[in-house]
Amino acid sequence: MQDPQLKIRNSKFEIRNSVPVILALDTSSKTTSITVTRGGRVLVTYKADFDETRSERLWIEIQSLLDSCGLTISEVDLFAVCVGPGGFTGLRVGLAAAKGLAAAARKPIVGVTSLEVLAFAAGPAPAVCAMVTAYKGDLYSQLFSFDSDGVPVPANAPMVGTLEEALARMNDLRPILFVGFDAGSVIEDSAPTQGSWSIVQPPDCLAVEIARLARVRLARGEVDTPESLRACYVRQAEAEINLAKGLLGSKIKRVLGREGPV
């Protein structure tokens, strides 16, 4: 049965409820954050560092937050989730949870990248460079401008590399607002030669900003289905990289060579 507050037109959702209930979550880093909002008001938030039990605890915390608001899953109008880039295991856990809930409730879902939600929290500004810690000292980075609704518009593709490589893409750009990874000393050292480079602290709870951005996307009809939503990894997982290099196969061969055929 179709939700009375939403209707589908041309495969998109048209909002009949001006104060939609949104459940947003971020599992892209070691810190997991969850929030429930109604319209522009934050009802409840949760933030904690999860260990290997994240997949189990996530469902418990989501249910606990909804209970504290007197809400059920069916009363959520929109699910929103960070699709990466970030930690591979965490992203898969969060995506599975959000997609499962949206499918069960038959509600739309919005996926936002960790880079664009950082830019959204920092902007609007002429240009914002968002940075997220990657693997082995590298960074994910991307440059954004903003549209008339204050929604980030990618100015280039997301990349993974060193801080120096990220800054090299912006040598001729100014002013730029940096958000995310703490690169203060490097950026401050570059500021005299680069002009108006400045830094803003990332939001304390990323899920709240995900919910804010998702509300704008919902109003514009820019939503996904659980089936269509995809993760944004930017780079392959370490296991996939090793497999492509033949390292995993070599390790298996070495083990078999020592132990003999099974």
Image: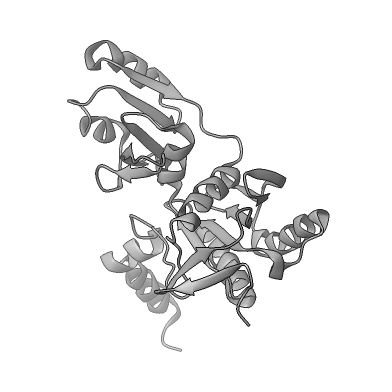
Location of the N terminus (image quadrant):
bottom right
Residue furthest to the left: 172
The residue lying toward the viewer, choosing from 34 and 136, is: 34
Residue 135: give x, y in percent of width and height: 41, 47
Left or right for 157, reference 101: left
- Is 256 rendered above or below residue 99? below
- Is 72 rendered above or below residue 213? below
Left or right for 42, reference 130: right
Task: Residue at 43%, 41% (x, y): give it.
Answer: 132
Residue furthest to the front: 16
Left or right for 107, reference 144: right
Q: Is residue 226 visible?
A: no
Left or right for 196, reference 5: left
Residue 227: give x, y in percent of width and height: 46, 76
- Is 217 rendered above or below residue 253? above
Q: Is residue 7 visible?
A: yes
Residue furthest to the top: 192
Task: Residue at 42%, 38% (x, y): give it.
Answer: 119
Residue 89: give x, y in percent of width and height: 52, 60
Residue 57: give x, y in percent of width and height: 72, 60
- Is 210 rendered above or below residue 253? above
Quarter of the rendering containing residue 254: bottom left
Task: Residue at 51%, 32% (x, y): give it.
Answer: 202
Q: How many marks?
A: 0
The residue lying toward the viewer, choosing from 107 and 31, is: 107
The way the protein has been coloured in the rendering is one colour
Task: Residue at 49%, 55% (x, y): give it.
Answer: 219
